[in-house]
Amino acid sequence: MPHEWDAYINAMASALDLRVEPDWLPAIRANVDVTMAMARLVDEFKLPDVAEPAPVYVA
């Protein structure tokens, strides 16, 4: 049974011309799960309307 991320993983592998071995899929799925959980935390963090972007640092 396909995992919820399999279509995404296959599409990204194809777009990046990467070979994905079937044995790697559990680790890739776990990585995507963690990455999406972190992204969800950032996405759900509400900023006040007066928040300003940080200046760009140039060395």
Image (cartoon, rainbow, N blue to C red):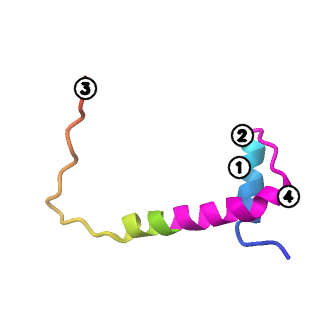
Label 1 near label 2: C-beta < 8 Å?
Answer: yes
User: 56 above or below 51?
Assistant: above
Helix, strand or loop at mark 1 = helix
Q: Disc 2 to disc 4, how far (Cα)?
A: 17 Å
Residue, disc 1: 12
Q: Nearer the viewer, mark 1 or mark 4?
A: 4
Q: Main secondary structure of the magenta part?
A: helix
The image quarter in which residue 5 lies: bottom right
Q: Which kind of residue does numbered mark 3 sit on?
A: Val
Expressed as whole percent of the image width and height from the top left, the position of residue 34 reads 55, 66
Q: Residue at x 28, y 69 (%)?
A: 46
Neighbours of disc 2 within 10 Å: few (<14), some (14-19), many (20+): few
Q: Disc 4 to disc 3, how far (Cα)?
A: 43 Å
Q: Which kind of residue does numbered mark 4 sit on?
A: Pro
Q: What is the number of the mark on residue 22? A: 4
Q: Residue at x 45, y 69 (%)?
A: 40
Q: Quadrant of the C terminus?
A: top left
Q: Disc 1 to disc 4, how far (Cα)?
A: 15 Å
The image quarter in which residue 25 lies: bottom right
Asked whether 35 or 27 is in front, the reply is 27
Return the disc, 3 or 2, that comes first in the chain's sequence. 2
* Left or right: residue 14 compared with residue 38: right
Q: Disc 2 to disc 1, how far (Cα)?
A: 6 Å
Return the disc, 2 or 4, that comes first in the chain's sequence. 2
Expressed as whole percent of the image width and height from the top left, the position of residue 48 reads 18, 66
Q: Disc 3 to disc 2, how far (Cα)?
A: 30 Å
Residue, disc 2: 16
Provide the residue span drawn in magenta: 16-36
Helix, strand or loop at mark 4 = helix
Return the disc, 1 or 4, that comes first in the chain's sequence. 1
Q: Does the magenta portion include 17?
A: yes
